[in-house]
Amino acid sequence: MERITISKDLSFSRIIHGLWRLSEWNQSKEETLSLIQYNLAQGITTFDHADIYGSYTCEDIFGDALSLAPSLREKMEIVTKCGIVLPSPNRPQHRTHHYNTSKKHILSSVEQSLKNLRTDYIDVLLIHRPDPFMNGEEVAEAFTQLKEEGKVLHFGVSNFKDHQWNMLQSHLPYPLVTNQIELSAYNLENIEDGTLNLCQENRIAPMAWSPLAGGNIFTSQDDKAVRLRTTLEKIQGEIGAEGIDSVLYAWLLNHPASIMPIVGSGKKDRIQTAIDSQSLTLNHDQWFEILHSSMGHEVP
């Protein structure tokens, strides 16, 4: 498994396991532990969480499984996020869906995540969404306190555009280490608006959520999905890939920005597909054919 340098003292596995739907997999804690062990055995050491996943339950499910083999904690990197607030039976005090990046909320969210995950530190904490009510100075105070206390080692963001990134970074004495963005051959927003360029400018490797476009490419009958499927199937045959999902992963993995796809499946065969895609090579013609199919026209 390729490793991607995140900072001088931290690296991630090139493929990241996402736990967004962990609560939907209906696994026993022993089964979840088995999945964690499978990932580690394959070289996937980076696990992506958020406080809100599974209506505030997924971190705890993961931590419950990890408690069966606590020594595994030192073999992995845990990423989690905070800043989104959702109404939930598990959080009855919240009336509305909103964002909260206040110092108080960040600190309390991290304390709960540490408890849920059965760990005393988080490798990387991300602000989950840009907050229009964000006080950059207050976020920096929370980050600095957490870093000084050893509760969070590094910080980053998720779904941030350049101006949002630059504002928060301006308040910090240390660099943000990643931006987790939606990115796939179907969803080109963060390529077209320069967000991916910002990552390269700042020498950071982005994490890519929904690298298979939430399954749209496989099932949708909209023009873009149909065009993409046709092209992906053609290139699948050319490079000897097992399926178009392999080609979709390869399209991201072949990009020079060191994109790290997040695989959000509880099925080992689907995780293995992403792992195996690291060996697939697309030439320029093939990479741009996929891009053209998504855009519906050639580049200028």
Image (tube, grey):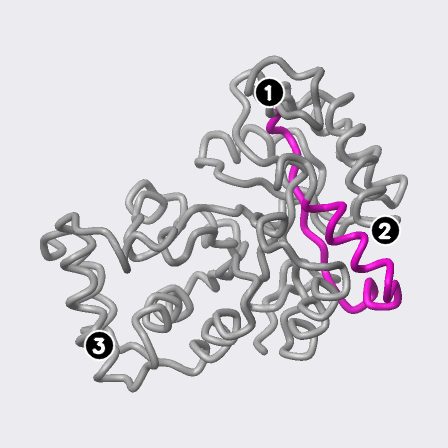
Task: Name the residue carrying label 3.
Answer: 235
Write the start and end of the magenta stretch as one range. Answer: 58-85
Mark with earlier residue (1, 3): 1
Instruction: Report the residue at 70% width, 67% height from top.
Output: 36
Foreground disc of the pair 1, 2: 2
Mark with earlier residue (3, 2): 2
SS at badge 1? loop
Q: CA distance from mark 1 to mark 2?
A: 28 Å
Task: Name the residue carrying label 1.
Answer: 134
SS at badge 3? helix
In the rendered image of this protein, does residue 288 appear above or below residue 138? below
Instruction: Report the residue at 72% width, 29% height from top.
Output: 140
The quarter of the displayed image where residue 4 is located:
bottom right
The quarter of the displayed image where residue 148 is located:
top right
Q: CA distance from mark 1 to mark 3?
A: 44 Å
Is the residue under label 2 in contact with that under label 1 (CB below 8 Å)? no
Instruction: Report the residue at 82% width, 41% height from top.
Output: 147
Task: Name the residue carrying label 2.
Answer: 119
Q: CA distance from mark 3 to mark 2?
A: 44 Å
From the top left corner, tell me how far across and down residue 142 is, in percent: 77, 29
Under mark 1, the amino acid is Met
